[in-house]
Amino acid sequence: DQQVKQNSPSLSVQEGRISILNCDYTNSMFDYFLWYKKYPAEGPTFLISISSIKDKNEDGRFTVFLNKSAKHLSLHIVPSQPGDSAVYFCAASADSSGTYKYIFGTGTRLKVLA
Amino acid sequence: EAGVTQFPSHSVIEKGQTVTLRCDPISGHDNLYWYRRVMGKEIKFLLHFVKESKQDESGMPNNRFLAERTGGTYSTLKVQPAELEDSGVYFCASSQDYWDRASDYNEQFFGPGTRLTVL
C-alpha cells in the first residue's frame, strides 16, 4: 500500500507559467516532507522541504505548501523554465518515530515547453 | 566536496549470479541509506546504517540481499543469487548525524545510482 502518492505521472507547462505538482499521503505520522528533482542517469537532488509544523516554505522560484488536514502537499514553480524539465519526487519521513528513511512517490515528469 | 559515489554505474548479470554494489558516502556522513527504483515505480527504501550499525533494514526484500558497512565508511550491497525481479536502479544516499530543524531540512544526498540488469 503506497503511503505517498503522486497521481499525475506527467505534466507539461509553457515556459514562464506556473507548474503545480501534487502529492498525497496517508500516514499521519509523517512529520517531514521533501521534494527531489531527478534528471536522467543522475541521482535525485534535494529541492525543497517542509516540516509538519509549517504550512508553507519558499525558496526562490520554488514554494511547497502543506495541508495536513487534507494530507496533501504541492510544489509550485514560478516562473517555470526549460531547465526545470525533470522528474519530481515527493518524499516523506516520520523522524519523530526514530526512523529517517524517506518514503517516495512514483514521481511526476515535468516538461517545460519553450 | 565530493558527493556520494557509486560503483559500478551499470551491471548486467545472469540470473543466479552474484553482484556487489559499492557506495562511498560524503566524508563525515554517519548515515548511509540504500534505496531501489524498479522501472517506473517509486524509489523504495532498503536499509539505513548509522556508522557501521544497521539502524533499519525493514526494506530489504529477502535474505538474498546482504549489506555491510565495515568501519563505518563505504558500504556494499551484495545480491546472491540474483533474480530477474532484482533489476532496477540502486541508489545510495548519505546524511549528517544531526537534525537541523532550525534550517528546516535534513537532506539526504543521493549518488547517481547503479543500474542492475538481471537477464
Image (spheres, coloured by chain):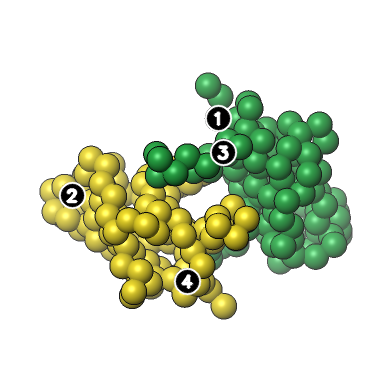
Chain colours: A yellow, B green
Check the image and name the residue furthest to the left. Answer: A16
**Residue B35 visible to the viewer:** yes
Q: Estimate the spatial distance between the alpha carbons at disc 2 and disc 1, rounded to whole Å.
A: 29 Å
Q: Which label is found at residue A28?
A: 4
Local SS, label 2: loop
**Residue drawn at 55 percent across, 55 percent down:** A95
Q: Estimate the spatial distance between the alpha carbons at disc 1 and disc 4, rounded to whole Å.
A: 33 Å
Q: Which label is found at residue A78?
A: 2
Of the two numbered discs 2 and 3 in the rendering, the one whose residue sits closer to the viewer = 3
Q: Is residue A104 left or right of residue A69?
A: right
**Residue drawn at 61 percent across, 47 percent down:** B91
Q: Which label is found at residue B98?
A: 3
Q: Estimate the spatial distance between the alpha carbons at disc 4 and disc 2, rounded to whole Å.
A: 29 Å
Please rate how many residues cluster around mark 4, counting C-alpha atoms within 10 Å: few if below 14, some from 14 to 19, many from 20.
Answer: few
Please rate how many residues cluster around mark 3, counting C-alpha atoms within 10 Å: few if below 14, some from 14 to 19, many from 20.
Answer: few
> Looking at the picture, which amino acid does disc 3 mark?
Tyr
The x and y percentages for residue B117 are 69, 55
The residue wearing badge 1 is: B3
The x and y percentages for residue A76 are 24, 55
Of the two numbered discs 1 and 3 in the rendering, the one whose residue sits closer to the viewer = 3
